[in-house]
Image: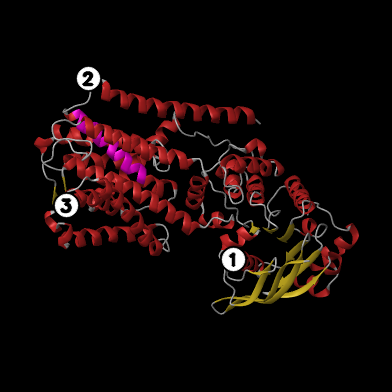
Amino acid sequence: MNDKNGSFMKSKRRLIDNILWIGLIAVLAALIFIPGAIGKSTHTHVLVLVLLYASMAQSWNILGGYCGQISFGHSVFFGLGAYGAGMAMVTYGSMPWLGILAGAIIAAVTSVLLGWPCFKLRGHYFAIATFAIVEIFGRVFLIWDWIGGALGLDYPIIKDSWSYFLWSSNKTGYYTGALVLFVFIFGVVRYIESRKLGYYMRAVKEGQETAESLGVNSTKVKLTAMALSAFLAALCGAFFAQYNYRVDPPMVMSLDMSMKFVLITILGGMGTFWGPFLGAAVLIPLQEYTRTSLAFLGPGVDQMVYGLLIIFMMVRQPKGIMGFLAEFGILGRNEKKEATGDDAS
Amino acid sequence: MTLLDVHGLTMKFGSLVANREVSFSVDEGQIVGLIGPNGSGKTTLFNCVSGLYKPIAGRVVFNGKDITSKPVHEIAQLGLTRTFQIVKPLSDMTVLENVMVGAYLRYPDREAAREEALKCVKLCYLEEFRDRLAGDMTIGNKKRLEVARILATNPKMILLDESVAGLTSTEAKEMVALIVKLREEGRTILMVEHIMEAIMPISDKIVVLSSGSKIAEGRPEEIASDERVISAYLGEKYAKRFAHSGGGVGHE
């Protein structure tokens, strides 16, 4: 058949993919140096959120999209990261960096301890178990005085600086930080996607029995994916706390926050490199601008728009925006079903 | 040298005995056929040997190591892998990617794994389909993919669960030729098969199961004339035909 043509198409697609990725980074980075592009404006705020939520969704995508383990518990890891930064800043009055690292490591360890029993459950049952975990952590953090309890942790007023990663007069620093976070997390996924771990994760998702028959230790793969996913989600949480100047349990460890991880990825396309970015790029501006423009209709309108969009997507194209793009032959793979005559099974 | 030794293996589901004290061995470099009527416990036996089920009694020794009740992936790492009767392609991955999952077991490096996978894809006549999604392939190609995938793990021994059944006669011939080629490479093969024309001519030994117990074991020509096997499974017609033709893949 058209073997040479086929692999030529494939490598061409990979090339386009790389160009898009480098191009996107270049454009986003260039914004920092264009006077007036980034600063105090609402648009900067929206851009920061797009990058943050894309990063969150991508961290979730490692476990949920590539490895097929749907977790509604990622707000726990997100929260642990946020508290790592918060504790360092508020309780210990230091720079946030060590706290961020500690939070991310604690998140990874916690995720493994939670994953150990939960991965004995398959499919929906795993997802349900992760629901319960958010509730448990949310409650415990509410009554735990050492970490601030229900009041949470309020950041002190500190001069804008990179060493404390805090800015009050201007958002350029946050934008730069969000971009670094975005490039790092997407870069990690881009790296593992084409390597052993990436293949093993997809194999576990597509068929655990098959994977194991090929020597894949599926529990180990899932735990690795979970730890990596939780670690990266915690970094996003730390950024979130720094950006909001505070952290309290409902802000981070809620089902609402967990759903953001899941829905953005589903909207964009699970198990795809671009999905989390596309999902965030569509949902976040929509959410922020409907919230301001439709505020007169009462609270929660943005949530309704959000919900309708998800419903529409699930009915029309369960593979998300990436699925739509593949229909038109843009981005990602587009292996059409080519009937080979005797299409049995 | 004995590569696989199954000793007194018993497996029950509730009160149903699927395998009753089955014992047999497979020597290195042999092709051993496992036959028997539907429901005689062939697939259960495969599942016990490959680690999917934990037998309630008996031992499975592979390459000098006791692998009874070891997890599937550890058994695969030791060099004993299996195909599935109901093919299980990783549907949303391409053919080459499917095979690469197997290749990563021995070649952690991406380029090396890809090279090894390409070799196995070629060996199983799948080269022209390598960038096709595995889920979109015909049943014949999916069965070949099962074989290519486990070959990529570089196994000492292969368990083939009805790899020939359901194929067109051309595909069946290709599959049989492939199996013979694998033995020539030095791999040991234990295969379950219903198609006698495929299994009889190439097997060094046949093990016959009926209602969970081993009723006979021997060279194909002994089995074909064994009274117990004829009454339990083969039937008079086949025994006569085998005696006349001397085997060979053919039409029913």
Mark 2 residue type: Pro
Asked if labels 3 and 2 touch by Cβ distance under 8 angstroms, the answer is no
Which residue is tagged 1? B51
Residue nearer the viewer, B206 or A55: A55
Task: Tell me which segment is drawn in magenta.
Answer: A43-59
Q: Considering only vertical position in the picture, is B131 above or below B190?
A: above
Label 1 marks which chain's residue? B
Distance in Å between CA atoms under marks 1 and 3: 48 Å
- Residue sitting at the far top: A35
Magenta stretch: helix, strand or loop mostly: helix
Q: Is residue B33 left or right of residue A173?
A: right
Q: Are marks 1 and 2 on the same chain?
A: no
Q: Which residue occupies the foreground of this view, A265 or A45?
A: A45
Q: Position of residue A142 (x, y in %)?
A: 16, 59
Could you tell me residue B40's position as x and y percent? 67, 70
Would you name the residue on which mark 2 appears? A35
Indicate which disc, 2 or 3, sits on the residue closer to the N terminus: 2
Q: Secondary structure at mark 3?
A: loop
Q: CA distance from mark 1 to mark 2?
A: 64 Å
C-alpha distance separating marks 2 and 3: 35 Å
Q: Hey, what amino acid is under mark 3? A: Asp
Image coordinates for residue B94, horizontal then vertical, percent: 56, 41
Residue that mark 3 sits on: A248
Instruction: Classify B20 as above or below A330.
Output: below
